[in-house]
Image (cartoon, grey):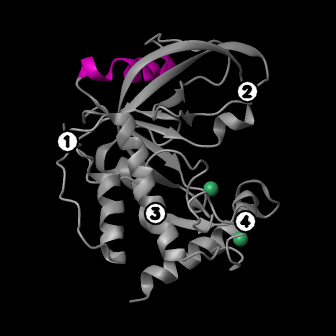
């Protein structure tokens, strides 16, 4: 199964551009264009304000909270939010491809493409609504759709090849692997590229990694500059290696966003250099 969208996982796109091309509502977490066989899902910090979040689980599945800011969530097609939730639940039956995007941390009005997914199942959970009142929320379980063909493993690995491999694994996932394995390997290849490039030095504070891992290699963590979470599919151009301190600083520190912008600048410079 191949995706009908021209994007690769990790691409950063202006949300308006997506809707200019394919239609669909320009706001909100779920958008289903009337004239194109797509359902777009957007995840971001929205839910975190209310005390819950969409997230990648260790099995590689993504848990997404349905539409509806107040009261119980429904599949009632006479309301906008109910119709959107139905569009996600029934996308397969309706012949619609489901595509997942995450709001960019850095660029306003931009989103990061996370790939094509399918809705495996859904359940209800009691979660707070925007007023802090408990309500019945719909939680969808999404699984990445595997497509494309496997490439030969390169014999000697140059930095370029590491990048290719990382990019390849993010956008064109071999079909003979299980989704769980692929999920792991996707992150692994991108991680490896970032760590190789950093060569044992944190790209935030420019200090040597504070300790070595069990294999005796410098311990650094992979961080995606556009994304809130670090799980799931990634793009090598936006992933940077950080020491644990700097990594926590980006996500939890005061002025973390500003620090994150500096890291993005560093990645931009890296791409600009030969
Ligand atoms: Zn650091
Ligand atoms: Zn991170």
The residues colored magenta run 79-94
User: Quick one: SS at disc 2?
Assistant: loop
Residue 218 seen in the figure: yes
Image spot of residue 269 (x, y percent): 51, 83
User: Residue placed farthest to the bottom in the image?
Assistant: 274
Q: Within 8 Å of ligand 2, the CB of disc 3?
A: no
Q: Left or right: where does residue 1 sit relative to residue 55?
A: left
Can you tell which quarter of the image residue 264 is in? bottom right
| Of marks 3 and 4, the one in the foreground | 3
Q: Are marks 2 and 4 in contact (CB under 8 Å)?
A: no
Q: Is mark 1 within 8 Å of ligand 2?
A: no
| Label 2, residues with CA under 10 Å away: few <14, some 14-19, many ≥20 | some
The residue indicated by pointer 4 is 246
Among the two numbered marks 2 and 3 on one chain, the one whose residue lies closer to the N terminus: 2
Q: Nearer the viewer, mark 3 or mark 1?
A: 3
Secondary-structure class at tag 1: loop
Q: Secondary structure at mark 4?
A: helix
At mark 3, the secondary structure is helix
Coordinates of residue 183 in the picture (x, y in percent)? 40, 42
The answer as to whether callout 4 falls within 8 Å of ligand 1 is yes
* Residue found 64% across the figure and 70% down from its top: 261
Q: Quadrant of ligand 2?
A: bottom right
How crowded pointer 1 is (Cα within 10 Å; few <14, some 14-19, many 20+) is rated as: few
From the image, state whether disc 2 or disc 1 is nearer to you. Answer: 1
Give the residue at x 45% y 45%: 101
> Which residue, given by chain and number where applicable, does mark 3 sit on?
192
Q: Residue at x 78, y 24 (%)?
A: 131
Q: Earlier in the sequence, mark 2 or mark 1?
A: 1
């Amino acid at each position: 199964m191949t995706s009908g969208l021209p994007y690769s996982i990790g691409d950063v796109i202006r949300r308006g551009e997506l809707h200019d091309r394919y239609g669909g509502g320009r706001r909100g977490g779920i958008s289903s264009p009337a004239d194109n066989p797509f359902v777009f899902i957007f995840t971001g910090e929205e839910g975190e304000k209310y005390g819950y979040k969409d997230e990648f689980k260790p099995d590689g599945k993504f848990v997404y909270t349905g539409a509806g800011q107040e009261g119980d969530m429904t599949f009632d097609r006479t309301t906008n939010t109910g119709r959107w939730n139905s569009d996600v639940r029934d996308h397969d039956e309706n012949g619609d491809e489901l595509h997942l995007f995450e709001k960019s941390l850095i660029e306003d009005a931009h989103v990061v493409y996370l790939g094509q997914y399918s809705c495996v199942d859904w359940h209800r959970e009691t979660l707070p609504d925007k007023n802090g009142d408990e309500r019945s929320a719909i939680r969808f379980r999404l699984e990445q759709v595997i497509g494309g063909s496997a490439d030969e493993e390169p014999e000697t690995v140059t930095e370029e090849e590491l990048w290719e491999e990382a990019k390849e694994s993010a956008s064109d996932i071999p079909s003979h692997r299980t989704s769980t394995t692929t999920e792991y390997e996707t992150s692994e290849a991108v991680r490896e590229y970032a760590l190789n490039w950093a060569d044992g030095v944190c790209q935030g504070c420019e200090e040597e990694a504070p300790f070595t891992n069990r294999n005796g290699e410098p311990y650094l963590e992979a961080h995606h500059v556009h994304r809130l979470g670090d799980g799931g599919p990634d793009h090598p151009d936006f992933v940077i290696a950080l020491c644990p301190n700097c990594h926590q600083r980006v996500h939890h520190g005061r002025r973390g966003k500003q620090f994150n912008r500096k890291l993005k600048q560093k990645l931009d410079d890296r791409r600009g250099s030969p």
